Image (tube, coloured by chain):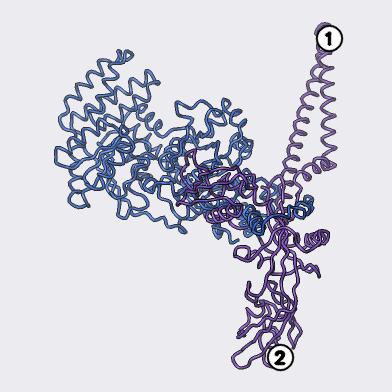
Amino acid sequence: MSDFDLVDIEVTHEPVDDVLYADPSETSENHRHTVQAVRLQAGQPDSELRSLKQLDENSVKMLEHQVDAAYRALFEMDGKALLADEVGLGKTIEVGMILKEMHFRETNDSVLILTPAQLAKQWQAELREKFGLEFVCNYDDEFSGFDDHDYIIASIDTAKSERYRQTVLRRDWDVLVLDEAHYVKNEETDRYELIDNLSYNYAFFLTATPIQNELTDLYNIVSLLRPGLFGTRDVFHQYFINSDQETLVNRNELQDRLNKVMIRNRREDTDVDFTERRVDTRKFDPSPAERELYQAVSDYVKGAYSQDQGQKLVLMLLQKEVVSSPEALETTIRKRLDDQSELTHAEELESILDLINNIDAVTKQERLLDIVEEARENVEKGRVIVFTQFRATQRRVAERLLSEGYTVHSFNGSHSSQEKEDIIENFEEQGGILVSTDAMSEGRNAQFCNILVNWDLPWNPMRVEQRIGRIHRIGQKRQVYVFNMALTDTVEEYVLERLFHKIDLFQQSVGELSEILTRLEESGKSFEDEIFERLVNADSEVDLENDFDAMAVDLQEQRDLAEKLEEFNSGVFEGFDLGASDD
Amino acid sequence: MTDAAVPVTQSAVETFTASYLRSLGCQIEIQGDEWQLTIPENVETDLPKGKHALLCGSVEEPDETYEQLHPESSFFQSVLDDATDRAPIGGISIDTSDTDVIVPDWLQQSEISVSNIEFTPYYDRSALVVLFRVTVETVSEYQQEFLRSIAIDVRSTEILPNIDETFLTLLQESATIQSGDIAIEPEQVERLVDASREPLLSAIQPQIDEIHQEASRAADAELEEYRQLQQQREDECETEITRLRSKIEDLSELIDHKNQTERVEALKERRECKSKLEEIETDLNELRRRREHGYPDQQREIRDRHGLEVVVTPVTITEVEYERGDVEFELNDGSSIASLVLGYGTGVGVTEEVNCDICNRSLSAENPLRYISNRIRCTSCNGE
């Protein structure tokens, strides 16, 4: 491949004078030391990931392919790499290791991590909990601009927005991390332009599917990282892509080039092996009092939202609380009653309080006993984790289980770091039931337990997967059982039956979900908003069902697309050995 | 020619630092990972005198009372800087007691076994081992640095194999090495160093070629981008010309039909448009002219900027005295025994080429010795 003219080479021979006329009075040993010093100066710095010793094995289990990828990206690719592992192999962990090592070596004075909006907070939590790295996220209250912090995680769209663009571009960043890098494949977009114009020393791009539509996507992404590696666009086309645009040719040379910048681990080549996951959704008919309460809250939410859409978050909360527990709902209702602006709905709210008081038994509570009792008889130390979104529910569930004579541990965000560790340790040693809020769903792992109950259900599937990920992870040796508890004819049933189950979301990994959700987010929608809007805007039960079906179709499409892309990329890179180079 | 760079591991860092500082007259007390170092006032060094507390290879951030000692620590870098300038010239003798006899490739690859080896030295010779630092720099790549050693015989100026590697190995051991004056005249050293530059460059040519290709590709990609940008500018000019022409036409029509005040305004505007049109047409012509000529200035500027700068610097020179003589290999193929006497240099190896008695091809790793009975026969002519 020589469709280009060679640039000039200028060779300068430095004279030998400095060596020849050095001080001859030195002792005999010193020549040995000088030669050794010169050799050490020319040697590669100690190339091992020294910071890894600092990591807590309970927080992050590092796999061989991840350590290799971090090592190669740092030491063999001069800190500019495209991490293109197949989905689910832990690219975020690889970047975490890289950033941790750079932090240790003090080569990371300023780091910018650009992600799709959906994933920004998750990145922040993972880097904090697994690697002890503190980043500010553009969604944090304390975020005050791209020139005010040195470690930033931001959505790429925020960074390219009119408001921030200039500040982002004005800085010289030490490290740039670009998640889901395939979203900058198109050189005509603002996103591409932003990355192209950013100034940085080291860059790590992540994607499981570097090729989205056509093979030139690969050219664009790689050229951002290593301009000139493939030569001009025309040369790349002529030399590496056959005329049908679907297959790569001259594969050996392409592989040699890609080897300089891209790492792609395949699932079959790694030791990632998950045990089976069994999902059991148990639906229960609510009692008449519970049904009445659900209806009243739903009517209130619908009415209030039609009058003032600004209250969306709190109304969404009520809709979630009503299927969790009367206690969770009561707290929020009382707060709203105290709020002056709620005078118009005071009567409605008071009647909801009445309905709450009418509830003697909580259906889910009674049914939970069936599950934990079964576990007590069949599983080591009867360990079960019960997840709820609300602390009031947590209290109720814990008290009831205690009164039934179970060993109960409670875990929520109010505990200190040490307390949290103690709770998990006690749970492991004593067994019994851990009743936890989603404060545990990131970072703390409990693979010694294999039964999980979703008492209530986060609407965002990523949150559900994070819960399951606490027990279904590397190191889990048994089958994992996930029980979902849902009341029939409520939002829970819709979300579970019509969305999650239909597209088999409970069997997707975080990586796969992130692909699907990020695609969905591309169309400017948030998953939770989608659910809520459908719930409050449906005119009838039939409407609601149809709406949820339509959303499922949409999700299925995104999932199919994500799968197709993954397959396509696997096909294209088939036969490529992008592991460590031979030299 | 040998790659002389060594991996900078933590243990290499600690061994070197202790050995070097002690050789200067510093005291080091080692307690686990903590070193108490004292650099006395009378020691000639740029390192700060006095007491230092060093912490080796620590992953924890030390408090202010400690300095870190690990491959990237600033203290270690100062130690290296101090040592590199100290004694770049020196000498060493290699005799038989220092090294094992080097068995040639064609014998190592052969099925014939060597039952005895005897070296008889006749006279001493000397060679210069030069360590060259070669840096290759271009805008699109990180600067790449190579450290290569090369050995040249002082009398014959032939490039000697192996001896530089032998020297580098002995350096790690306890052979006596002297610093300072060597027996060769500076002018001759200069001639020898110059004579070794070209063979050195040839040896690293493949690496340079690879960087050269990458830099050329990068230049080409940049030029292509420039071409596209210019094309875009041409397109913009053409659009603007069309717009201005149409506007001038419209204004001309207006001028025919308006009252005097409006006409004056329109005339003025048309004049401005015409002048703007002229300006853009000139720009467009210039853009086209440059395109037809292939943007020679830009080509030159981009290619110059991406050009490779290779700098070859001799950094240390060591006179290596070695012994020349004969080596006798006693060979055994299971049924017969033969003896082979060849010219040999300590650290250099066999100094003469050995040819097959039948076909006269030279023996090598690819064409090893096959038969020894009566005559020497190579593997290639085995079947002939």
What chain does mark 1 sit on?
B
| Residue occupied by mark 2 | B375
Residue B166 has which mark? Answer: none
Specify the quadrant that holds the N terminus of chain A: bottom right
Residue A467 falls in image quadrant = top left
Q: Kindly identify the residue that appears in the image at 20 percent across and 25 percent down.
A: A356
Name the amino acid type tagged 1.
Answer: Val
Q: Are marks 2 and 1 on the same chain?
A: yes
Q: Can residue A11 be seen here?
A: no
Q: Dot 1, crowdedness within 10 Å: few (<14), some or many (≥20)? A: few
Name the amino acid type tagged 2.
Answer: Arg
What chain does mark 2 sit on?
B
Q: Position of residue A357 (x, y in %)?
A: 17, 24
Of residues B159 and A378, the one nearer the viewer is: B159
Q: Position of residue A24 (x, y in %)?
A: 73, 55
Label whose residue precedes the other's in the sequence (2 or 1): 1
Specify the quadrant that holds the C terminus of chain A: bottom right
Position of residue A126 relative to residue A530, above or below, is below
Q: Which chain is purple?
A: B
Q: Which chain is blue?
A: A
| Residue occupied by mark 1 | B264
Of residues B237 and B177, the one nearer the viewer is: B177
